[in-house]
Image (cartoon, grey):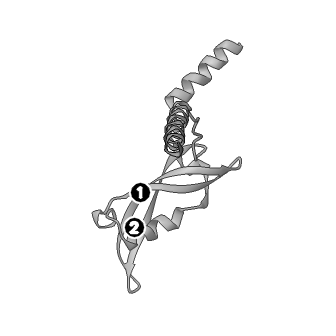
């Protein structure tokens, strides 16, 4: 008798588990972007060893805006690429370059902001409907 109740409870548990999994799978979450907007920031740096200048490297940072004021933006580095291949590979030099800009306040006019065409279309349609 107890084995029958055990199997009935086991089957009921599996049934409710499957229902829970199907409801959870169908629920879609709206994911909010971590950044207000994204952009490209380019800067040149001098490379020196033992106090003497050995070269110059141009770095292009892909940044995400975390906070903003009318003229300044606090940015986080998403990715970077340099004009010198030695600094493009993972390592201490790349991390040092990333840390020079990561979580800093920069002048917003120095950043070339990437425009989202879908967002632009939405704004145009909203303006068309409202006007």
Q: Name the residue tied to disc 1.
A: 80
Residue drawn at x 50%, y 28% as measured from the top left: 117
Residue drawn at x 59%, y 49% as measured from the top left: 65
Mark 2 touches mark 1? (CB < 8 Å): yes
Q: Nearer the viewer, residue 27 or 112?
A: 27
Q: Quadrant of residue 119?
A: top right
Query: In the image, is residue 119 above or below residue 31?
Result: above
Distance between mark 2 and mark 1 Cα atoms = 8 Å
Q: Quadrant of residue 123?
A: top right
Task: Identify the disc placed on residue 94.
Answer: 2
Judged from this view, the residue extending furthest toward the left is: 85
Q: Position of residue 109 (x, y in %)?
A: 59, 48
Q: Nearer the viewer, residue 2 or 131?
A: 2
Residue density around tag 2, few if under 14, some if 14–19, many if 20 or more, within 10 Å: some
Dot 1: element: strand
Q: Position of residue 16 (x, y in %)?
A: 55, 36
**Callout count:** 2
Q: Is residue 5 left or right of residue 80?
A: right
Q: Nearer the viewer, residue 126 or 69?
A: 126
Dot 2: element: helix
Residue drawn at x 62%, y 51% as measured from the top left: 66
Residue drawn at x 39%, y 78% as measured from the top left: 48
């Amino acid at each position: 008798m107890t084995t029958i109740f055990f199997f009935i409870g086991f089957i009921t548990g599996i049934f409710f588990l499957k229902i829970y999994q199907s409801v959870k799978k169908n629920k879609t979450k709206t994911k909010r972007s971590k950044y207000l907007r994204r952009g490209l920031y380019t800067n040149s740096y001098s490379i020196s060893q033992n106090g003497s200048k050995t070269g110059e490297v141009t770095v292009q940072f892909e940044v995400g805006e975390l906070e903003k004021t009318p003229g300044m933006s606090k940015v986080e580095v998403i990715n970077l690429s340099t004009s010198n291949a030695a600094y493009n590979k993972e390592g201490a030099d790349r991390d040092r370059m990333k840390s020079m800009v990561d979580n800093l306040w920069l002048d917003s006019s120095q950043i070339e902001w990437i425009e989202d065409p879908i967002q632009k279309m939405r704004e145009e349609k909203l303006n068309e409907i409202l006007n």
